[in-house]
Each structure stands twice: as C-alpha cells, then as structure tokens.
Amino acid sequence: MNFSDLRPNIYNYLGFRGVKESPETDSEIKSCLEELETLAQFNYLYKAFEEPPEFLKKQPYAGFLRGSGGVILSVMTLGAGVDIRINRLNRTDMSRAVVLDACASAYLEYRSDEYERSIGENLSSRFCPGYGGSPLSDLKFIFGLLHPEKIGVTLSESLFMLPAKSMAGVIGIGGGGKKSCGGCIMLADCTYRKEGRRCFSQTE
Amino acid sequence: MFQPDRITVFDGGFGSELERRGLSGIPEDLNITRPEEIAAIHRAYSCADIITTNTFGLNRIKYSGEFSIEEVAAQAVKNARAANKPVFFDVGPTGAMLRPLGSLTFDQAYDAFSEIAQIADRLADGFICETFSDLYEFKACILAIREHSKKPLFATMTFDGTGRTLTGSTPEIVANTLSGLCVDALGVNCSLGPRELVPIVRRLLDSTDLPIIVQPNRGLPVLEGGKTVYKLGIDEFEESISEMVEMGVSIIGGCCGTTPEFIERISRFSGSAVRPRSFTPKTAINSSAKLVGIDGVKICGERLNPTGKKLLKQALADGDYDYLIDEAIRQQDCGADLLDINVGLPQLNERAVMPEAITKVQEYCDLPLQIDSSDPAAIEAGARYYNGIPLINSVNGDEESMSAIFPIAKKYGAVVLGLTMDKNGVPETVGGRVEIAKRIISRAEDFGIPRHKIMIDTLVVTASAEQERVSVTLGALEEVHRLGVKTALGVSNVSFGLPNRPLLNRTFLVMAMTKGLNMPILNPLDSEMTGAVRAFGVLSAIDKNSESYIDIYKDYTPASASSAAPAVSKQAEKPAETLYESVVRGLKNRAGELCEAELKTKPPLEVVNEILIKALDEVGREYESGKLFLPQLVSAAEAAKAAFAVVGEYMPKNAGPKGMVILATVKGDVHDIGKNIVKVVLQSYGYSIVDLGKDVPPDKVVEAYERYKPLAVGLSALMTTTVRSMEETIKALRAVDCRSYIFVGGAVLNAETAARIGADYYTKDALGFAKKLAELTDEEK
C-alpha cells in the first residue's frame, strides 16, 4: 500500500479543503493505515451477468452501462473489527477515531480498486447505489442476487450496509462508466463541488 | 445416521445448481413453485450420506417470499426426502447485524431461530447451521435450536483469508465457544477453496475433541467471457479433502460452486474410520475476539464491582454505564487478562442489570468476563447474553449451590469458579478445603462438566483477624493445584485492617504464585501488583525469553514507575508550557495538569473565561479559516474537556455547568461518529451532555427530555432513509410541548430539510452547534 495514493482521498474525507500540509495529521494517518493493515479483514463477493438484471435497466445505471458488454455486481467489506475499533476510539481518543474512520473509507476504496483490477481487464469504474440519484433501495436487488451475508455483510431496514465499511458496486464489462454529479441528492449542498472538487477520483 | 467415528459425506452447492438449471427467484420459494426441479437437485446429490434442505434464507427476518415459513419448510423437507437419505434442515444467518454494531437484538434473533427450530424439529432428522460470520448471532441460533430440539446440530462458520470470521473470531475462539454450547459437530463452510481452508481446519482440530465438518467452496470464482465461473478441478478438490480427512476431519461436503460430480467423487470416503487425533483440553474462556487460556498466571481485574465505590454505585443506580465501561477499558489498558463483573446492590434488579452491564462492557472492551453474583438467576441472565464463553463466579460445596449453578454452566459452556466452603462455613484445615474442592469437581462431572471447566478458589482470610490461617489458604491451593485444576484467589482480601496494604497484597501474591496460583483477582491499576505477576513470569520461566516482561519494561525508568498506566503519549514530543497552548495544540494529557496549576493562583471562572474559552475561540477561528482541521479541532476539544473536568472539581457545587444538551442518533441509524464529535466539542465548551447513543427510538428521546428538561436536543441522521425517523422524533418532542431548542445535523441534511421536518436549527458541524447555542443563551440573558 502506498501512503501517497491514499492521502488525497483521506484528506478529502477529513474535510481538508484544498490544504496541502499537516505533518501531525500525516503521521496520524500513517499510523492509522498501519493499524488498518492488520485490523481490516478485506473480503469481497462478485457475480457477472451477461444480461444486466432488471433493476439496472433504468437511469442512471442504463446510461452508466451504455456500451458495456455485461455487468458485474460486487460487495466489498473491511469487516466488523474496524467498526468495533472506531467505536472504542469514540470513547478513548475521539481525534484518532475521526482519522481512522476517514482512513478506513479510503482504504476500502483502495482495496476494492485493487481487487477489481485483479479480476479482469477493461472494467468500468464502480457505480454504487445512491450515486447520481439512484435509490438506495436498489441495494436490495444486489443483496437478493449476491447473498453478501456469506461474507458477513448485512443490509439494515434503513438501507445501510453493516459492517459500516462496506460497499456495493455496479461495474460495466468492456467499456461504459463515468461517474458524474447529475441527479445526486447532495448536488445543491455539495461542499466538494463548491470548492471545485468531486467526492470521487476524477482520474477514473 | 451419524456415527462420530465414521466419515460422513454431506451434499454440495445448491445455488450454483439452481443457476445451472436456469432457476431464478427467491430460492426458498422454488421449493413450492418448482418442487420437481428442487427434488431433482436433491436426487442428484443422493450419493451423499446426508441431504440438506433448500432453506438457507428461511427465517422471519430474512425471508421475503410469498409463503408461510411453515409451508416452505414442509415442502423443502419433502423435496429433500426424494433423495432417500437422512435430511438435515439448513439454517442460515438472519442477514441482519446484531447489536451493538447493528439494530437487531439478541432476543429478536433468538425468536426467529426458535420459530425455525420448532417447525423443523418435527420434519427433519437434524440441523445444519451454516455460513454464520457473527459468533453472537450463532449463539442465539444454537441456543434456540438446543432449547427446542434434541436432534443433532452441526454448526459451521465462514472465515476469511486472515483466518478469522468477519467479526474477528479465530478458529480457537469459534471451537471453544461452539464446543461449550454442545453442538454435535463444528467447522467451516463456504469462505475459501479447500486448499486455503487447510490451516483453519488444522487449528479447529487442535482446539476441540468434537467432530469437525468442512464444506469448502470450489475455490474462488473467476471472470470468464462475462460470466463468473468456478475453475477448480475435481481432482484438486478431492486431494485437499483427502488431506483434511488424514488430519482427522469427520464430516465432508461442498459449498458454492461444487456440483454432484464433486460429491460423488468424495463419497468414496464415506463410512471409513475417522483418524484419531490427540487433544488436550484446556481451561479457557473467551469473548468474540479474545481467548484467554488459564495457564501460567492470568490477571482478573476486580474493579467492576460497586462494593466500596460510591460513584459506581450511583452510576449503576442511575442506569449510567459510562463509568463501568471506562473502568473496564482502564483495567484492560493496565494489563488485565479478564475482568470480574459484579452489579450486586440492594436497590438494583440484578437479573436485569447484569445482562445489560455485560453487553455494555462487551461493546467497548474485548476481554473475557467473569460473571460474579450470588444470585443464580442473575448469573444465568448474564451467561445467556454474554458473547463467548464466560467464567462464573461462583459455586460452593453446598448441594443447593451446585445444583443451581452447574446446569447453567453446562448449558452455556462456562468455566466455573468453585469456592472451598459450604453451609458449615470455610473449613479451618487444608484437608477440609481440599475435600470440598474434590466434592465440587466430582459433582460437576455428574452434570457433564469436565474437570478443565472447573477452577478452585481456596479463599483468602484477612491476616489481621486470622493470621495463622493464611498458610491454610496457601496449603490448600498447593494441593488443589496438584489435582490438575486451575486456581484463583481474591488476593487483596488478605490485608484488610492493616497499614500499608499494597505491601501485604504484593507479598501474599508472590507467595501464592509459587504455590500454583493461576488467576489472582486484583486491582490491575496497581502497577506493583501487575509488576509482581510479570516478574514471576520471568523467574518461573512461564514468560519464555522474558519477552512480555521486556516488552512492558523496556522503557522503564524509576520515575515512570509512579504512574499506574503504561505511560504512552503520542504527543510526547514537546511539552506545552501553558494551558492555553495545551488546548490549542490538543494535548489532552497535559491540559489537565496545567489546568490544575492555573487553579492554584486563579479562580475557576477566570480560568474558564480567560484561558479555556479564548483558546477554543482561537481553535474555532483557525478551523473555520481552513488552517486547522477536523482531527485537530477534536483534539483541542478533548484537551479543553480534560481541563473542564479539573475545573469542575474547584467550582462551587451550585454553579453547575453551562447547561445540558441531549444528543442522539435517531432510530434506524447507527452512524454516530458525527454525533460523538458534537459531544466532545460541546463538552469542551462546558456543556454537560446526556448521550442517548445510536438507533434511539423517539420515545427514549422524549423520556430523556422530560427527565432532564435540557437546554437543547441534538439529533443526528446520516441517511436519507433515517431523516424520516428524525422527523418522527421531532413530532414526538413537539407533542409533549418541548421547550428545548431542537438541533439537527448529518450528511444529508440542510437548512431547508431541517425546517421542513420541524427542527429549530440546522448546523453543518459541531462548531456551528456550539456557536449557535452560545448565541441563543446570550440572547436569553
């Protein structure tokens, strides 16, 4: 794992609005990432479909998947140990809890990118239900098709996944797939956009 | 049907077979809508010795199909019977996360599994509970089945590449827990391919004498031509299974991706003799993440006990568990291996408080616990809701005590601490005490509790009252140790009524350890006591190469010895010179000391207004202008909070804090880091906080409002889906004519939404909350 790869994303999550340097935070981040390497239990599950499942035939998925020859549904997690640790830090060291929480989010993205690269070439970026105004309830379809409880990931009635550091993604095979802000529920209030940035990496 | 000494073969993957036959939809419903096809899959697996029903997702929490659970279960068993083999009912997890990480309660999970158990007990020949990844949910499942059925119960969990379950349990922890809960076989399914499972299976085999079951995936799937396919060949699968059979595995089968051809191949092992394996039982207790073997000397922390602790008494009486949790964390940080927990107070309903206290402590502290009560019902309640295998404190040589406690210990797999006394009191001789120890061990065996699940306490007397008998305690300890059971003593009792108690405690501890004491119950915050245990480890060659001793004392200087806690401060670099600086730089350890010094020369209010508030104001300005960042803001707030705690001790009693704020993350939402940041920041400004936690139903918020009539109520929600429940909470508060300011915050909120759902104020961050609150209180003045 390369610290400098994760750093911009972590600063993003910490709300470091465009600022470059903070040696104290840098050293805390490094130590949190070290902790995550043993604490996190990255696990994933995926399934490919030649024909996209019904729920993906609507927007914004249809647009995202245009030009792709198939679709992968995928669920990734860092495991419950991270949640338990952050929970305890909330009580003993709130400042570290904040940093570890941000690091864990970035670390999950990083590990997920890494595993996606390992399963195949020419895959699109990852589109998660909730992006671009897509309903969170689409997670139910993904859970129905993938059974992520096999890797211990659950979906609550309020439609968030637990362990908290888990993601579900839609990936186009052989093309398609740029993320955009259109239709996002946060569009009007987005602090990232106000600063001319995006919550996702724009190099994708 | 199932002979533990013969290899038994289970069937293989079902989902992949459904797919191969083009069957889609809710798998459980296919039992009724496509019975012939389902029966055909079962028939294809008739080469197996035991057939599993197609009911993995059939429980009331997970199942979303159109039939009743009873109907599906009946048809599923009927379909499985088509193979003409014994049928085990398949039970999978609920798909919901249990508290504290999620919202599902232990009882809700238990009820869902009980329903299945009652229905399936009449239909099937046994149960296979599989693909569980949370040990706590698994305990609910196993108890539910055990309490409703006498049929065989096989239990398997999933592990990841690091050799842990998703909630962090190792194979040793899983084996200790499931063996304790008396399943008929335990093991691993799904997870990984057969080759990757070998090391996990090895560890399971070494940790229990129960039959081990293995049902691996057909390796990891790969992407090929737009499809996910399993590529592992039958030969390789068989080779790994064969290796595991050689190791001593009793029950084999397949999971995701395996087909009837795979099971056909491994069915050649069916009926052959299980390889014998050697296994030495150990006295061990565990939480979901830590297993503590009682060998050498293990420290049991004694401080979760209200006796003689006024603050803890008050906190427990108020239903406030923060004190207890902090005390648990402190003992863990000081090196305790396990913690005794006692909530016995005349004004408390111990049977209700014990499980509550245990779950609260386990949420934050992963040490195993010793459940300490004189009320068997409180012990049972504690053991039931405890996550893992606990130690029970205690039983004594009285028949009444033994017949009350042993069934509880047996049912929950607990280790029991036996006291060498009975209705005639504590024997005055070594022989008398050893005799009771033997009685306890032998009576436990009648209840099916083996010797390694018993520990003996030969009872410490106070040297001031019964000086001659100290040697009786030690003599009995030595003899009991020779019986091959582990020993415990409440060490600190020896010094009651004498001066310089620590010296006597420490000396007695060393004397007892040389006689074979395995578990002193003591105060881990006393570094001289824990130090004696560490030193004993070196001198008795328990601590190999003195590794743990060196690890603890490598930075030892005589000056560092005075503080009980290991002196680790990440901000050790350059000490802050002033209180102001310590707050701005977020040095919370230093802030308390410096505040103490300031208070020697200045009145408390001056310290608050001239130093703390000004420092916080500077931090706030820097944060808003983007020079300081969230982690630093939080550190500064934590430092100011530490200083406020010191100021509080100097304030006149009636001055009180600035005002009270109730905080809660609303029902259905468990994201609470934002709320916790608000808590620290508000505390740093001197507000007192009632934190109701996360997933808080509206009526709890209303109840707290009516009890405290606070200055403000702050509600947090992270998800669009939980804003609704925020709105309901506000409605409920309005319905009782709430006079406090209602603040809302969270990622998906804005001023508009806040107004729409009836809140008074929206704040985008913790600092905004503090500023608005200050504005409002100034206006009031």
Image (cartoon, coloured by chain):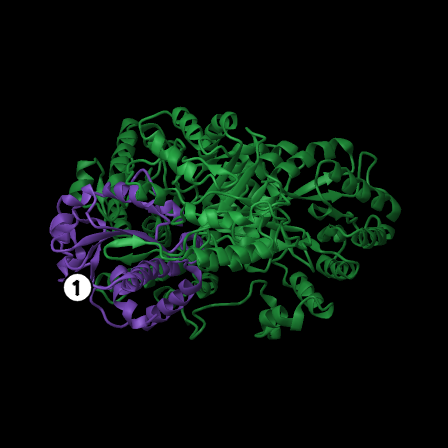
Chain colours: A purple, B green
Q: In this view, does B703 lie above or below A130?
A: above
- The amino acid type of the residue labelled 1 equals Gln
Residue at x-position 13% and y-position 58%: A194
Residue at x-position 46% and y-position 56%: B237
Callout 1 crowding tier (Cα within 10 Å): few <14, some 14–19, many ≥20: few
- Residue B704 appears anywhere in the view: no
x and y percent of residue A24 in the render?
Answer: 35, 70
Classify residue B666 as left or right of residue B438. left
Residue at x-position 75% and y-position 53%: B495
Q: Kindly identify which chain the residue marked by label 1 belongs to.
A: A
- Assign a secondary structure to mark 1: loop
x and y percent of residue A57 in the render?
Answer: 15, 44
Quadrant in the rendering for residue B416: top right
Residue placed under numbered mark 1 in the picture: A202
Residue at x-position 34% and y-position 25%: B67
x and y percent of residue A27 in the render?
Answer: 37, 71
- Residue B42 appears anywhere in the view: yes
Classify residue B425 as left or right of residue B10. right
Q: Is residue B129 above or below residue B631?
A: above
Quadrant in the rendering for residue B377: top right
Quadrant the C terminus of chain B occupies: top left
Quadrant the N terminus of chain B occupies: top right
x and y percent of residue B565 in the render?
Answer: 56, 63
